Image (cartoon, rainbow, N blue to C red):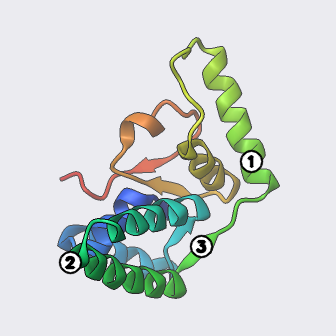
């Protein structure tokens, strides 16, 4: 097991209380003392929770409960800010993917998350393998796979 950067879909599973993902997260924390997440994943989670707030009273209550849980989660773990090295690694990935004729490849937050993982020597944990597997040099785990 290597130190991991968890992306937003894994964070969502943790907040929902997915037992299998929580078990793997606890194992990781026992070994490394923390989970890492990118500031990009932080934004993606907050964006979704703010959007949920607009869907009525019950959704607003749920959103606020999850926001509290998420803030506590971030306090207990490590949010990695975007820096120059991560941006350079993301730009390298983008240039490489465009050069190998992935003309349909679009710039995305996933590139910044991947750049953050590469710049910090972290394995990315995601259930979104399809978008990350095309990025060379990126170690990937999926805590939702059996």
- Of the numbered discs 2 and 1, the one sitting upstream in the chain is 2
Question: Does 86 sit left or right of 31 as displayed?
Answer: right
Residue name at image x 58 percent, y 47 percent: 114
Q: Quadrant of residue 97?
A: top right
- Of the numbered discs 3 and 2, the one sitting upstream in the chain is 2
x%, y% of residue 134?
49, 30
| Above or below 100: residue 48 | below
Residue 108 or residue 76, whichever sits in front: 108
**Disc 2: which residue:** 58
- Of the numbered discs 3 and 1, the one sitting upstream in the chain is 3
Residue name at image x 60 percent, y 54 percent: 117
| Alpha carbon distance from label 3 to label 1 | 16 Å
Question: Does 70 sit left or right of 63 as displayed?
Answer: right
Question: Does 29 sit left or right of 103 as displayed?
Answer: left
Question: Does 12 sit left or right of 100 as displayed?
Answer: left
Mark 3 nearby-residue class (10 Å; few <14, some 14–19, many ≥20): some
Residue 75 or residue 3, whichever sits in front: 75
Label for residue 79? 3
x%, y% of residue 70?
42, 79
**Disc 1: which residue:** 87
x%, y% of residue 20?
21, 68
Residue name at image x 41 percent, y 74 percent: 28
Name of the residue lying farthest toward the right: 84
Q: Secondary structure at mark 1?
A: helix
Mark 2 nearby-residue class (10 Å; few <14, some 14–19, many ≥20): few
x%, y% of residue 65?
32, 84
| Above or below 96: residue 66 | below
Report the mark closest to the observer, 3 or 2: 2
């Amino acid at each position: 097991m290597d130190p991991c950067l968890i992306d937003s879909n894994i964070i969502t599973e943790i907040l929902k209380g997915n037992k299998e993902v929580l078990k793997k997260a606890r194992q990781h924390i026992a070994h490394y003392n923390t989970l890492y997440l990118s500031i990009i994943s932080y934004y993606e989670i907050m964006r979704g929770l703010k959007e949920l707030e607009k869907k009525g009273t019950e959704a607003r209550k749920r959103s606020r409960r999850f926001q509290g849980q998420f803030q506590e989660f971030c306090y207990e773990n490590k949010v990695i800010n975007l820096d120059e090295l991560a941006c350079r690694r993301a730009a390298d990935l983008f240039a490489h993917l465009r050069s190998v004729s992935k003309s349909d490849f679009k710039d995305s937050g996933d590139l910044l998350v991947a750049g953050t993982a590469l710049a910090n020597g972290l394995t990315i944990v995601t259930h979104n393998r399809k978008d990350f597997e095309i990025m060379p040099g990126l170690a990937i785990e999926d805590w939702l796979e059996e």
